Image (cartoon, rainbow, N blue to C red):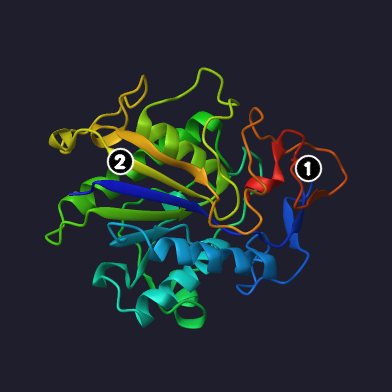
């Protein structure tokens, strides 16, 4: 039965531009997957991921099972940790990473399709041999985007599915690691703890690049309850308490590119392409910051 859940955000990534008129994403640097809007980490982000790996190797109890958003930047962030896990023969459970689209990026509502990750077969064969197939929970973000409320509903659904699945495994893992994106990382904190602010723009859960959050379970005896009313401090699967909130003490430069909601992310009809730079004040479609991506 799970006792602890750790959540990390991907490292510093490359940039892209989106033209909201044509609904077209264009990378500044070609993605290894060939998909516009699915960038790799920068060299700086790779360095961050190596520092994160050192931290993850020291977790006590050790990480036993891992899920990741299938976007390239997330799986790439876990690569140094997976390499070290193999070299140091860490617990067998964390020798693979389960691909999970329910942990994928949040995009605001639009009338065009947002980027989708590469197929598992391509990611596993050409880039990440440690990647495992999806468990088949069927929680997939809408390609046309989501509202903030829709994002939190999606996160509640996928967390409930993952926790129930892991609790029922014969191996009985105690620790779970999730790798995801800024907006999803915030929503995970809210759904696990049940602390949903009246104003979703509130800066409550930290999510800098390669940051680490941790949650301890409150009531394992309620694990088999399926609840949709996770708010008002209830939390998913018995509820969880915050142990770490976007901790960056393992990073040489500390916290960078943290993010928070700024109302619904909407894609405007401004004819100028939107430049998704690595800046805290750069907005997507006039309301959402690019630094979450």
- Is residue 25 something one can see in this rendering? yes
Measured from the top left, where is residue 161 in percent x and y? 28, 46
Disc 2 on helix, strand or loop? strand
Measured from the top left, where is residue 222 in percent x and y? 16, 33
- Is residue 118 something one can see in this rendering? no
Disc 1 on helix, strand or loop? loop
- Farthest right residue in view: 272
Q: Residue at x 32, y 73 (%)?
A: 95
Measured from the top left, where is residue 180 in percent x and y? 49, 52
Crowding around mark 2 (Cα neighbors within 10 Å: few <14, some 14 to 19, many 20+) is some
Q: Residue at x 75, y 39 (%)?
A: 285
Choose top left, top right, bottom left or bottom right for residue 280: top right
Q: Is residue 117 left or right of residue 35?
A: left
Position of residue 228 relative to residue 69, above or below, is: above
Position of residue 93 relative to residue 267, above or below, is: below
Q: Residue at x 61, y 56 (%)?
A: 115
Position of residue 184 relative to residue 232, above or below, is: below
Residue closest to the eye, 5 or 232: 5
Residue closest to the eye, 122 or 237: 237
Measured from the top left, where is residue 62 in percent x and y? 30, 61
Residue closest to the eye, 128 or 87: 87
Residue carrying label 2: 216
Q: Which mark is residue 282?
A: 1
């Amino acid at each position: 039965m799970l006792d602890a859940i750790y959540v990390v955000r991907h490292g510093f990534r490359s940039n892209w531009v989106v033209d909201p008129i044509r609904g077209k994403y264009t990378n500044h640097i070609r993605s290894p997957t060939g998909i516009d809007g699915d960038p790799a980490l920068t060299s700086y982000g790779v360095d961050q991921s190596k520092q994160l790996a050192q931290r993850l190797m020291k977790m006590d109890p050790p990480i036993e099972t891992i899920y990741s958003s299938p976007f390239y930047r997330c799986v790439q962030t876990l690569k140094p940790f997976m390499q070290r896990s193999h070299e140091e023969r860490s617990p067998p459970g964390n020798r693979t990473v389960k691909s999970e689209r329910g942990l994928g990026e949040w995009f605001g509502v639009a009338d065009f399709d947002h980027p989708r990750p590469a197929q598992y077969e391509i990611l596993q064969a050409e880039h990440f041999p440690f990647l495992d197939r999806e468990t088949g929970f069927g929680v997939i973000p809408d390609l046309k985007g989501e509202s903030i409320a829709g994002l939190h509903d999606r996160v509640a659904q996928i967390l409930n599915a993952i926790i129930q699945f892991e609790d029922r495994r014969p191996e009985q893992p105690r620790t779970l690691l999730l790798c995801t994106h800024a907006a999803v990382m915030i929503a995970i904190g809210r759904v696990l703890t049940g602390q949903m602010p009246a104003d979703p723009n509130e800066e409550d859960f930290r999510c800098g690049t390669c940051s680490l959050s941790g949650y301890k379970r409150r009531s394992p005896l309620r694990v088999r309850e399926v609840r949709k009313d996770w708010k008002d401090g209830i939390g998913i699967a018995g509820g969880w308490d915050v142990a770490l909130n976007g901790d960056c003490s393992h990073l040489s430069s500390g916290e960078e590119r943290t993010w928070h909601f700024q109302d619904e992310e909407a894609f405007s009809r401004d004819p100028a392409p939107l430049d998704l730079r690595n800046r805290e004040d750069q907005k997507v479609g006039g309301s959402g910051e690019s630094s979450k991506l």
